[in-house]
Amino acid sequence: MKLTGSQVLLRTLRRENVDVIFGYPGGVVLPIYDELYKEEFRHLLVRHEQGAIHAADGYARASGKVGVCLVTSGPGATNTVTGIANAYMDSIPVVIFTGQVPTGLIGSDAFQEVDITGITRPCTKHNFLVRRIEDLASTIHEAFHIARSGRPGPVLVDLPRDVSQATIEEEDIRDDFNTLNGLEKPQQEDIAKAVEMIRAARKPVIVSGGGVLLGKASEELREFVRRTGFPITSTLMGLGAYPGSDPLWLGMPGMHGTYYANMAITGCDLLVAVGMRFDDRVTSKVDAFAPDAQIIHIDIDPVSIDRIVRSHLSIVSDAKTALGLLNAALAAGGPVPVERTREWMEQIDAWKKRVPLRFSEETDRIKPQQVIRKLYELTKGEALIATEVGQNQMWAAQYYTYDHPHTFISSGGLGTMGFGFPAAVGAQVACPDKTVVDIAGDGSIQMNIQELATAVQYNIPVKIVILNNQYLGMVRQWQQMFYGRRYSHTDMSYAPDFVKIAEAYGATGLRASRPEELEAVLKKGLETPGVVVMDIRVEKEECVYPMVRPGASIADMELGVELPADKAAPTNGGEDPQTRSFN
Amino acid sequence: MKAKENTIALLVRNRPDVLARIAGTFSGGGFNIESITANITKTPETTKIIITTKGSASTMEKLKKQLNRLVDVLSVDDLTGRMASRRELVLFRMKWSDETRPAVMAAVDLYNWKVVCMDDRYCVIEVSGRKDSIDRAIQLLDPLGLEDFSRSGMVALEKFKPE
Ligand SMILES: Cc1ncc(C[n+]2csc(CCOP(=O)(O)OP(=O)(O)O)c2C)c(N)n1
């Protein structure tokens, strides 16, 4: 039997267990869309191609599977670029199918032609232009393999119109491709060396990252913490891999990290970094990052190792394998002596008590942190939280407690405003039984607000909580701190009525303006079926604290509140942080 | 750290775009390509690329890891400081004059260069050798009517494969 390229595409997607495509049609992908019409593949029509790629990305983050999106050539393809770069920076496995003009017209500046493989070369893990139908199936399989293997990432497949229209005998379809070189297994002597360092540590700390979630290693991480008794902090990308309600949990480190996480890193003598890449939002001034520590760096990507911070021992491996081997070796050697670290643990406790995460509550205005706390209470920590970018994102990271893996979905590496809502849509598609909440800023939500139509059309019941401060809050915070309160072009008070916007799209809109309204509105919003937009009017000039100034040491935090009298001065934690109050 | 010249041999899959990806890895990482040669190998599915580039040992480590990360790159060999033959090929076009002709021909004889073609207005000379001898040939020929030249860039081959 003869199959068209479009039929081969769908057949191959089925073989890859794809169950949903986020897409947007156009001229050159019409043969594929016509096939979708006949076959009733689950396809969600977004309202902007950026929404499609972010939704596929959110789907991948929530499900651990490969996300898929399909768009047309030219403007359809270029509209996905931000989302592709976003997935690339956070190592998210997605496969993007773009239409392309017929092979004969490639390079002729044909209508809606762009060199999308050229454009996306630096922000994809790999990309392909399929020139012959004979290569189609194997190329698609290879794309999926590349997207999910090793350090995952986005892979783009460009499909010329004539390739999706050409035909091939079913028995001539080739599904095989040359597999890539597999990863080497960690060396046993490195594992032994690591265990030795772990046993010798007096002031240890673990920093876990997104690689632990991508490698589905949170069980192994939990066991590793159980076996060592070490305190643990995690980057933004790694939240949820270790339960945030555990006593050994230190919160997030870095620019908006907790006082105690940053002090622990600064004072530690052993830092075990797993699946994290020492992003500058985490390390800030590199020389002052864990200055006295031996560093063990476990990462699947050799490029990450010794790139920013020099490690004393590196293990190139996925987190699951490496932690598994470490756990086994630790188990074989008996428990790690707790007496060694006792003093350190007391020190950490003192730091926790001295400067907990906190904000000053008020009675006449809603504090954004309070919104997140309340949301946590009402959802009992069981919601899947997506965020936009800015203050809303940092508060969502600080004030919600993540106990389960894959429950915090946020744009880490690229910091893409407009990511959260479409990503929440994708996550809700992946987890239909979960409560999915997008924590948004009033600026960010306006970047992809058109996806309300998608969510309503397919009844994807995402709840949007807008922390409406009428500013581009995080930028305003920088202007406040570094530009003498000159709020140049960050005023967002000219905004639509979000309640009416929601209603216009067929969703539910709610508003809370005063603290006493907050709980009722959040409750009602969470209970109301379908898509709900909650416009929460918060304190306009609230800042995210702690804050490390760009380029400063992470021990040098501004806390926004006066430090209490210092009864537990850091014995070895470096300088005491400066405290300035801005409010 | 001092930037020295490094020779990197890449074995890559012979696919469209592979050169662009490699070039992109250099430009994206802020590395400069001094010379590059590429051609097929014994197996037509693979291409060998020899690149020379300047950089300290630690930047070279980073570059090599990044090249290794490319899907179409099968191996990255750093030939810097290894036992390898290194050669470049150059074609020189000389303008004849009665004063310079004897000196050019004497140099061709002395160094065993090859005259590829000539007539009464010009001649083309083929020279191959290590980079420094090519540089010396340029110095020698320049005052003798050197009009233009084409350099191939370096090719290199390890003298034996270390076990
Ligand atoms: C696409 C994009 N453009 C610009 C920025 C720069 N930026 C970072 S945070 C921010 C302000 C976000 O404002 P809002 O969404 O209202 O959130 P808030 O900080 O007030 O919570 C901006 C403009 C960005 N991250 N992404």
Image: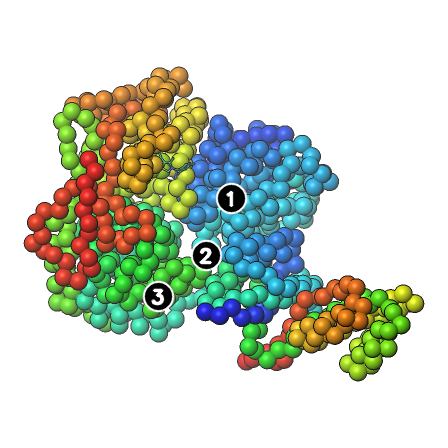
Residue A329 drawn at (x, y percent): 28, 69
N-terminal-most mark, 3 or 2: 2
Establish if B110 lies above or below B118: below
Residue B84 location, quadrant: bottom right
Name the residue at 48% across, 44% down. Answer: A85
Residue A210 drawn at (x, y percent): 36, 51
Mark 1–mark 2 Cα distance, whole angstroms, equals 15 Å
N-terminal-most mark, 1 or 2: 1
Left or right of A229: which side holds A441? right
Disc 3 residue type (three-letter): Ser
Disc 2 residue type (three-letter): Gly
Task: Give the residue pinned by disc 2.
Answer: A150
Ligand 1: give its quadrant: top left
Q: Secondary structure at mark 1?
A: strand
Quadrant housing the N terminus of chain A: top right
The tally of labels here is 3
N-terminal-most mark, 1 or 3: 1
Name the residue at 12% across, 67% down. Answer: A339
Q: Can the viewer see residue A200?
A: yes
Name the residue at 59% across, 45% down. Answer: A117
Left or right of A469: which side holds A335? left
Q: Residues within 10 Å of mark 3 (few under 14, many from 20)?
A: some
Q: Are marks 3 and 2 in contact (CB under 8 Å)?
A: no
Residue B116 location, quadrant: bottom right
Name the residue at 45% across, 51% down. Answer: A152
**Tag 3, which chain?**
A
Q: Can the viewer see residue A327?
A: no
Task: Give the residue pinned by disc 3.
Answer: A311
Mark 1–mark 3 Cα distance, whole angstroms, equals 33 Å
Task: Give the residue pinned by disc 1.
Answer: A95
Q: Does the numbered disc 2 mark a residue whose Cβ is under 8 Å from ligand 1?
A: no
